[in-house]
Amino acid sequence: MSSAVASPSETEPSPSWLPPRPPIVSGEDYVASLRGRGLRVFLLGERVAEPVDHPILRPSINAVARTYDLALERPELATAVVLETGQRVNRFLHVTESAADVVQQNKMQRRLGQLTGTCFQRCVGMDAINALYTTTWLIDQAHRTPYHGRLRAFVRAMQRQNLVVGGAMTDVKGDRGKAPHEQSDPDMFVRVVRREPGGVVIRGAKAHQTGCINSHWIVVMPTMRLGPRDRDHAIVCAVPVDHPGLTFVVGRQSCDTRALEGGAVDVGNARYGGQEALIILDDVFVPDELVFMDGEVEFAADLVERFTAYHRRSYVCKAGVGDVLIGAAALIADYNGVPQVSHVRDKLVEMAHLNETIYGAGIAASHESTATPAGNWQNDPMLANVCKHNVTRFPYEMARLAQDLAGGLLATLPSEHDFADPEVGPLLKKYLRGRDGVSVEARARALRLIENLTLGRNAVGYLTESMHGAGSPQAQRIQIARQMQVEDKKALARALAGITDEVEGADLDMS
């Protein structure tokens, strides 16, 4: 078993903005690191005193903790060695140094999807670090700014302490028909409200932020290409999650309050879950050392496109969750006594076909990575957009097939508390049996897992996030249209068709 963090001899002094602390090694260490931070977290109309102990939030914390334990169990998969230093770091904090590194990210993501059946919340930070690595280098080349060195120092500090870095890109946007500077309320896009000696003050909100409460740091980024009048919105910076200027409002998820009912069956996936929140940034001061872009509007689009290319192929994690759904669908078919029926097997084959198509496009995008001028590696953007476009469709069809195989009991199964009732419990166990030799509880648990993935809490990550995360379907279609090289394809067709002159009047005599 290998540690995924630097040994004490490899550490260097912490920067002034980062309190010194021992590196996190295990999932247990990670959970302990979240305690006592005094975050302003609101859920169901109340402030949460300690998120770690809240039954609705804890499953999402467990999912992140699993990323640390996988790094201990399989260091070749979930950690990487930095070539410059020889230090082994968590792969979620690693700047890619080869195409193989980018591929290993995908393999790790699929495995974590299999282990948790949900979103494990660290991919945005990983992809943000890698996108920024190139973009900050390019800005420095153009403007002689110090951003790239600052980013490198930030990443090294995160690696030494083995912290969770989240990303915040999606602004609340206000009137979608207007640019940031045109909004009646300029806070609809995060912006710099003033520049002070030694830093900037930012204000605004970021929506749908996956795992933000479970992170240690948040990297704030612009959400779209910007024009010259949007200079104050062209801000990239890192903010500690426990900054007093941050407020987190947790989004509702279908069936989330089942975690408050004291059962273990009806929740479907009792141990792991996802989490999204609205982050409100109320005049947050950010020191210069943590600012990686400030006003360079011409590089906003480059950053967004690099990030989305990384992040859209990161959706191979849905293939890991899909593996769980296929398994649950096969289980319920078995428990219902029809595992060998031809149409049942055909539906499972179709689910596998769709799932591997998602994975195939994503990992192909990673295999086709190329070196950037900054020295890290960028995946193929066309294949990344194809991967994500598949993800906006295929999980929904897989969910439909799983529900088909599960049957109506998926949506009408009584509560586990009814099964425990001395009066109706025995009757339920009599009438809700499947095939002989399978307990009613096993059948109920399989049904609740399918419900969890296709209707309940983890349908947020598996379905809705698949639709809107990293950009909605039209965003991928726009990028595919830009990258499809249709003129090159037309040239291929002309060559094979023997078309040498398209000008009217230059036709051959075909009589």
Image (tube, rainbow, N blue to C red):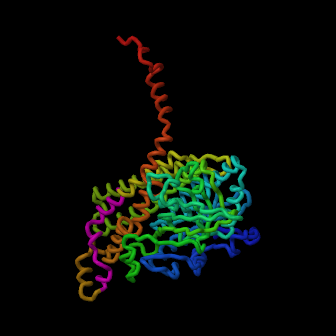
Q: How far across and how far down the image is residue 9, in percent?
A: 76, 70
Q: How far across and how far down the image is residue 145, in percent?
A: 71, 53
- At 63% from the left and 73% from the top, the residue drawn is 25
Q: How far across and how far down the image is residue 336, in percent?
A: 28, 68
Q: Is most of the magenta stretch helix, strand or loop?
A: helix
In the image, taking residue 368 as reference, residue 415 lies left or right, namely: left
Seen in the picture, residue 310 relative to 196 is either above or below; the reply is: above
Q: How far across and how far down the image is residue 369, in percent?
A: 59, 48
- At 35% from the left and 72% from the top, the residue drawn is 448
Name the foreground residue: 228 vs 91.
228
- At 32% from the left and 83% from the top, the residue drawn is 417
| Residue 409 sits inside the magenta stretch | yes
Name the foreground residue: 259 vs 66.
259
Q: Which residues are magenta?
A: 397-420
- At 50% from the left and 49% from the top, the residue drawn is 384
Extreme front residue here?
184
Instruction: Place residue 429 in its image quadrant.
Output: bottom left
| Residue 149 sits inside the magenta stretch | no
Q: Quadrant of the N terminus?
A: bottom right
In the image, taking residue 161 as reference, residue 228 lies left or right, namely: left
